[in-house]
Structures are given as C-alpha cells and as structure tokens.
Amino acid sequence: MSASTHDVPGKPPMRVLVTGGTSGLGLAMAAALATAGAVVALTGRSGRRADSVAATLPGAIGIELDVRDESSVAGAVDQAWSRLGGIDLLVNNAGIGMRTVNPRFMTDPRGFWEVPVDGFRSVVETNLTGYFLVAREVAPRMLAAGSGRIVNISVSDSTMHRAGFVPYGPSRAGSEALSRVMAADLRGTGVTVNVLLPGGATITGMVPPEAVREGRRFLDPEVMGPPIVWLASEDAAGVHDERIVAAEFERWLRDRPRSATPRP
C-alpha cells in the first residue's frame, strides 16, 4: 500500500477538498492526507473553526461551507479551486446524524412518525442533497481538466434500515444510490467515483457520549486514514465504482486482483 499521495517523482501533490473536515471522520481523513503529502482544503459551517483546525495540519487551508446552500457550495468550490490550483480529489463527507432529531437515539429509539419534519429535511438536505450539490459543482471542473476522483463517505448497510434510524438511514441509503449513478454517469470520462465507509459504529460527534461511556465497541475515526490515502495515490488511479470498508481495507486490498480494472 502506498503511503504517499504523490509517489511519482516530479509529480505535484494531490489537491484535495474534504467537506465536513473539522471533526470526526473528516478530520481523520484530512489529517491522514495532509500527513501523506496532499494539499488539503477542509470545510466547516464555521469558517473560523475551519481555519483553526486547518492550522493544525501541514499545509492545509480552511474554508467556510454549508453544503445545503447552493451559493455557499459554489463560493466554497471556487475558493478551493483557486487556492489549491485545482481539485484532484473530492471527499464528500459533511453530514449530520440522528442526534439532531433524537439525542437519545441509541437508548430510546423512536418511530419514523415521531420524527420532526424540519429535522427530517435537515438531515436529508445535508447528507444527500449536500453530496449532490458539491459533486455537481466539482465534477464539471474535473471533466474539463480531464481527470479527478470523488469519494463519497457512507455507513454500514445495517444502519440504513435499523429501527429508529429515520432520517439518517434513508439519507445514507440515498447517498449510496447517488454514488452508483454518479459512477455510471462518469464511467470512461477520467473522473472516478468510489464509496468509503468505516465498517461499524465510530467514535464521532454523532454518537451520544453516554453510549461511549457504556463500553460499547466503537471504531476509531483514524480507521479511515489508510484507505483514503490509498484512494488518493497512484495505485488507485482508475479505480472506479468500488465500495470500500475501512475496517476491512487491508484484506480487501490484499485480495483484490492485481489486474483489477474498473467495471465495464
């Protein structure tokens, strides 16, 4: 496995935009990519916080972005493209979880009929529409440049149909369907689309603190580091329409045929 995002002599570093990069999975991926040599722009709804977090990573920059807002998306992508000199890899990660509609969702799950309409819309607009808006803004630029990579962050299948998980489960199921259609639309263009997920419940701000204290088993966000660095490397050039589980990444990579090519 390559440990560098620019392992070809003389090739400039990978330019990466990570949405929702100020905490959790996004920060773990941004840190891993920056450490591996990528130039990273990470975003957050608070520009001040994005700048503060970016200052802790080598060469990173922070950008304010609300993925639910088209004008915010357009402005943020413009800024990232200008400041990085282009975007080679988009990591669509910004999202909100069940705590926004039910703070005790793990111990007191509620039926879908009890979910506030505004809460439902907010989660779907962030987790699904947000992925669409950012990719919609970035993809034409990548197509014009002749190449690019998009990685959409997802969750385990069980989360998508677990009792008490409306609207988070449906929002993530929708983002996976979106990813497959994006991959089909972009096949053969030089722009690739892949899905990456942790492979289990992960310690992030989406998990109630009491659940962590109860001794449940959780993955560490850093589990996302090795696969996202690999997806940014020369070894992953041309990898398309794959669904990679971070917790199983080493085995997946080992078992992957050396001659593997993108699905026709």
Image (cartoon, rainbow, N blue to C red):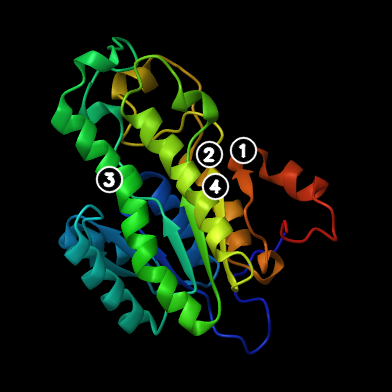
**Relative height, residue 79 to residue 180 (above, below):** below
Between disc 2 and disc 3, the foreground one is 3
**Mark found first going from the N terminus, 3 or 4:** 3
Cβ–Cβ under 8 Å for marks 4 and 1:
no
Identified by mark 2, the residue type is Pro
The residue indicated by pointer 1 is 247
Of 190 and 93, nearer the camera is 190
* Res 81 quadrant in image: bottom left
Name the residue located 49 percent from the left edge and 77 percent from the top edge.
143
Task: Pinpoint residue 43: horizontal percent, then vertical percent.
Answer: 29, 61
Cβ–Cβ under 8 Å for marks 2 and 3:
no
Identified by mark 4, the residue type is Leu
Question: What element does badge 1 sit on?
Answer: helix
Cβ–Cβ under 8 Å for marks 1 and 2:
yes
Distance Cα–Cα, label 4 vs label 1: 10 Å
**Label 4 Cα neighbours within 10 Å, binned few <14 / some 14-19 / many ≥20:** many
The residue indicated by pointer 2 is 198
**Label 3 Cα neighbours within 10 Å, binned few <14 / some 14-19 / many ≥20:** many
Distance Cα–Cα, label 3 vs label 4: 18 Å
The residue indicated by pointer 4 is 196
**Relative height, residue 139 to residue 178 (above, below):** below
Question: What element does badge 4 sit on?
Answer: strand
Say which mark, if any, is on residue 126.
3
